[in-house]
Every structure is written in C-alpha cells, then in structure tokens.
Amino acid sequence: MSFSIGIVGLPNVGKSTLFNALTRSKQADAANYPFCTIDPNVGVVAVPDERLAKLAEISQSKKIISTAIEFVDIAGLVKGASEGEGLGNKFLSHIREVDAIAQVVRAFSDGNVIHVNNKVDPKNDSEVINLELALADLQVVSKRLDTAKKTARGVIAKDKEVEIELLTRIKTQLETGKPARALEYNDEEKIILKELQLLTAKPMLYVVNVDEAIFASPHPTIPLSGEGAMVIEVSAKLEAELADLSVDEAKEYLKTAGITETGLDKLVVASYKLLDLITFLTSGEPETRAWTVKNGAKAPEAAGVIHTDFVKGFIKADVCNWHDFINAGGWSKIKETGKLRLEGKDYVVRDGDVVYFHVAT
C-alpha cells in the first residue's frame, strides 16, 4: 500500500534541499533561482520505528524491513498559479495526484538565496500558496456546479440534489478563503468529493524551514493558520549536512548539538499521522517487518496488505501488543502469558499490534 506526500511551496524556500535530505540523494536540483524543478521528483523514505530492532532481536530475524512513505518534490508555485502563472496549471495537476500536502514555508535568512517576494515572511508565503490552491479548487467546483445545475433541469433532477447542495457549500467555503478540508461530509458526499480531487480537501502539514541555530535551541513557535493543518519545524540546511554523514557521524553530531530528533524524523512521523495511518508488525526468524494500513482497518484488510489473496483466505489472526511480545520473549512463550489473542474478521487492527495471520491456501 503506497501513500504519497507532495512537497509544495514558493520557489527557493528549500523544498528540493529538503527532498534531497529526505531521500539522501541529489535527485532534485537545488539551485538559487525559481523553477529549477520542473518535473516532480519522487523518492521513497523509510518511516523510523524503534520497535523493529527490538522485535528483531527477540525473533532473531535475519532482516528488518521498515514501512515507507513516498515524497514528491513539486516545483515552486507563485502568485497567479491558478491562472497559469509560472507554469502553475501543470504544477497544480501534480499536486492533485498526491494523498497529502507538506507545504514548506521559509523562515531562514540567507542573503545568497533569493526569495521570490524579496522578503522572508512565513505567514505571507503560506497565504499565497493557500489562496492559489483555493482559487484552483474554486474553478473546478464552479465548473462542476454549472454542469450539475444544467443536468438537474431534466428528469433526473432528484439525483443531482445532493451534488448541487455539496458543491454550493464547498464553493461558499472557498470564496471565504477557507479550505474544503475544514467542512464535514457524510459518506455519500465523500464519494463526490473524491471525484473532485480538490487540493484544499487534502490533509496538509506546514513545514517551517528555519535557520540551523534556531532549530537547535528553544524559541517561540512561528504562528501559521490553516484549518486542519499540522505544523512542524525543520532546518533543510542541517538535514542536508546530516545526509552527507554516516549514520554514526550524524548521531554524534546531533548529540553534540543537543538535538534529540531530526527534522526529517519529525516530518516522516508527522506525515504518517497526517494520512491517518497506523503500523502493525510481523516478526519471525526470516524477517521483522512494519506494514501500513489506514486507521480503522479490519484484520482481513490488514492481511491483504501482505498479499491480496489473504483477504479472501483470511481465517483468523494471532495478535498481541509489541511490548507484550518482547516481554514474553516471542511467539513460543507469549501463549503462556495469556496475552496472545485470537481475533476474527471484525477485529480492528491497532498501531503496535504484532500479528500472525492464518489463511486458507
């Protein structure tokens, strides 16, 4: 199961630098001029999970496999993007294809890196991007609403009532400058919403790109508005420097600087939460592995992530919490503790479950 996060923002705010650090590559151009990224760059990043090594030690696993999230580095947007400025229409179409948005705003000071608006103002940066996303959505909704109203004049008017009411409500929301994600939708409306692929309906995370010194020391949080949006801080410059070091060298550097968690770790974990995902685990001698499912997934759906045939073939699942698995000493001993549960098709998988699926072959 693959999930993607689109990295967006104004030109020269550090998107490509951040992407290269995330993927430990030089895949994306990171130059001091607007639109150095034209086609989106795609990279798959492992989700850090300290549970895996502990489980693998108990199971004496031969390998460890993390779950992952796909990041897409999308070219910088500018004011007027919704009208085609700066190749905006092309870039906006790239955003429609991702599951969620990480909006990078610039809070670092560097006279050698040109800001497209000639000033460092994170709040203004976010307002420009949010307005362009809303305007692009407004075009989509208005066009669809006009079509629905014309169709409703015929004999199937009743079938269009829900759609017209929904589109009208979203249009009003966008005209007031608020995102579609801030509204509540019933199941029927969610089907229509998914078809629209609205940019402002996607989950969003603000990534504030700060100076290295600020990131490493206590400081006031930079205020950013946006209904339903999370906020984290990173220093893309610091992350790029860490990416050039070995794992041990990076750990020593962070320890010396008094940094307990990298910005990239925060970004990956926050993205995971943003998409409302959970991790369940499998562990044995061949491998210990993390698997991704949507929060609320039932046992057969989780089994299907491992192999699609497991959905129909699902019989039951042995389930325990990862702490209990470690404390008991693995599969062979946890049965003795009474903490191993036998779950059926209606069981909702929880984050941190260690699972063994029984399926018909």
Image: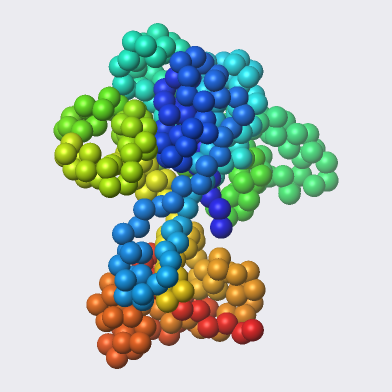
The residue located at (32%, 22%) in the rendering is 107
- Seen from the viewer's position, the closer of residues 214 and 151 is 214
The residue located at (55%, 19%) in the rendering is 35
The outermost residue toward the right is: 155
Image quadrant where one finds the N terminus:
bottom right
- In percent of width and height, residue 198 lies at 59, 37
The residue located at (46%, 57%) in the rendering is 67
Q: Is residue 15 above or below residue 55?
A: above
- In percent of width and height, residue 323 lies at 28, 72
Is residue 336 in view from this perspective? yes
- Seen from the viewer's position, the closer of residues 128 and 9 is 9
The residue located at (70%, 34%) in the rendering is 144
- Seen from the viewer's position, the closer of residues 82 and 311 is 311
Q: Which image quadrant for residue 264?
A: top left
- In percent of width and height, residue 316 lies at 51, 83
Image quadrant where one finds the C terminus:
bottom right
Q: Which image quadrant for residue 87?
A: top right
